[in-house]
Structures are given as C-alpha cells and as structure tokens.
Amino acid sequence: MENNGGGNGRKILIVDDEMRMRRILADYLQIKGYDPLCAEDGAQGLELFAREQPDLVLLDVMMPRMDGWEVCRRIRSGEGGAADTPIIMLTARGQEEDELQGFSLGADEYIAKPFSLKILLARMEVVFRRGTVVRASPPPSAEAVATAENGLSVDRPGRVVRLAGQPVELTYTEFELLLYLMDNAGVALSRDRILDNVWRYDYYGDARTVDTHVKKLRSKLGSYGHCIKTLRGVGYKFEAPR
C-alpha cells in the first residue's frame, strides 16, 4: 500500500486500482496542501481508513477484492471509523443508474472519469463546505427546538432530528432537505426548485438525485416518512403529521 502523506492539510484517502491515477491525484493534492494517502484496492482502502481516519475518501468503483460500492456501504455503516466521512465516488462508468446508486449508498459526490483535477478540487471544497453527517447530541432546550410536529422535532441550532425523543442520524443534505420541505409545508415543490434551494447550485448532475435523497429520508423518518408526499409530474410536498 502506498502512503504519500505530507503537509499539515486534511487527509485525503485515494482508493483506486490504477497506479497512474493514484500518483496523479496524490501529487496534485499534495501540491494543493492536502495530505494524500493511497490504497490500491477496496480491502486495503478500508484498512487504511481505519488506521488513518481521513477527512475525505476519493473512491473508485471498479476494483479487485472489494469494489467501491461495498467500501462505501461499510464506511457508512460505521466500520473502521467515522460513518460521516465525506466520500466522492470516481468511476469510468457514467450511467445514471450508477450515479444514483452511489448517492443511495451515501456518497456525497459522484464524478465520472476522465475529469479535470480543478473540477475535482472544486467538488472536494463544496463537500467540505456542506459538512458531514449530523451527529446525535444531548437533548436540546425547549427554546432550541424550532420545529416540532407530534413527535417529530427538529433542533435547528444543534442540527438534530428526533422521533419520539430519539435522535435520527441524517446526512447534511438530508437534514437540509427535511428543513426545506417542512418550512414549505403544504406547498408543491418541483425537483428543480428543491435543487436550487437545498443543493444551492453546487450539484452538477440530474435533478432525479432528489428522488434518491427523498427515498432515503423517508426510510429514516420511519412512520413519519409518509409526510413527504410525491406529486406525480411535479415533485414533492410536506404534509405535517396529524
């Protein structure tokens, strides 16, 4: 396993079976002040992830021993370290289904090869600005709970969602999506409008990524998932629980 660490910047774990790609990315990121770490396959990537606890993972999809989908799934399950570590998927497969699968597994971004190193760096900076997974925190005071609907509560300052008092782990984007839907309860919202207000023009892909995030959000909200209504041919609408 290669380890191209250096500098005092954020640690970036590069997991790719192509040696040339690893070297290009590592050299570029080191020049830009990051501390790159390299693994040549998914299994090695998980080992290095657990040992080094990187700030972000650049993850190829098609690799021997363990592909990127499985690595992403295991990281998001909490295996080896922080489940909220940002992940950017890198792949030569540009099909829409692959992109949506990456998001459904919890990837923060998806970039098809070949790509510009400047664009990659810009995407990394966007991901860092967005933040990571919302962590559970001590129960907030009554004043801090800005939204509460029959057991569904949202602590905006603490960025924590609770169902019947129990914290729900949401990604940064899922939390923003829920807030936007709840703030516009009863309003029909198109996918493009949701993208503009939640992703804030930082997303470069298909508007149907909204569908993937809504599906994940509904699942995490359990019995409250039905509050997010699908409007065929339009988008979505939030209806407060009764």
Image (spheres, rainbow, N blue to C red):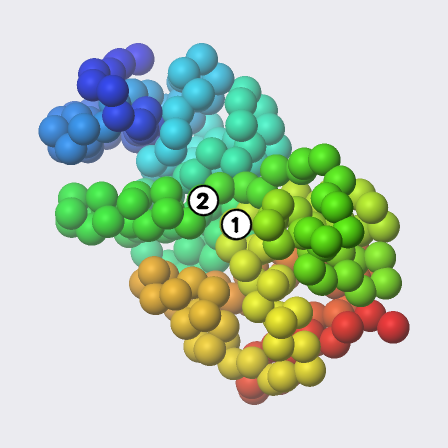
Going by the numbered disc 1, the residue's amino acid type is: Tyr
Classify 18 as above or below 124: above
Classify 104 as above or below 188: above
Q: Residue 131: which disc?
A: 2
Residue 202 in picture, x, y percent from top left: 34, 60
Q: Are marks 1 and 2 in contact (CB under 8 Å)?
A: yes
Locate residue 96: give its quadrant. Answer: bottom left
Residue pictured at 52% horizontal, 50% vertical: 172
Q: Secondary structure at mark 1?
A: helix
Q: Is residue 38 left or right of residue 115?
A: right
Residue pictured at 66% horizontal, 47% vertical: 160
Going by the numbered disc 2, the residue's amino acid type is: Gly
Residue 163 in picture, x, y percent from top left: 80, 51
Distance from Cα at disc 1 to Cα at disc 2: 6 Å
In this view of the protein, can residue 65 be seen by the observer?
A: no
Q: Secondary structure at mark 2?
A: loop
Residue pictured at 12% horizontal, 29% vertical: 31
Q: Residue 107: which disc?
A: none
Residue pictured at 72% horizontal, 35% vertical: 138
Classify 125 as above or below 40: below
**Tally of numbered discs:** 2
Which residue is label 1 attached to?
172
**Residue nearest the observer in this picture, 68 or 136:** 136
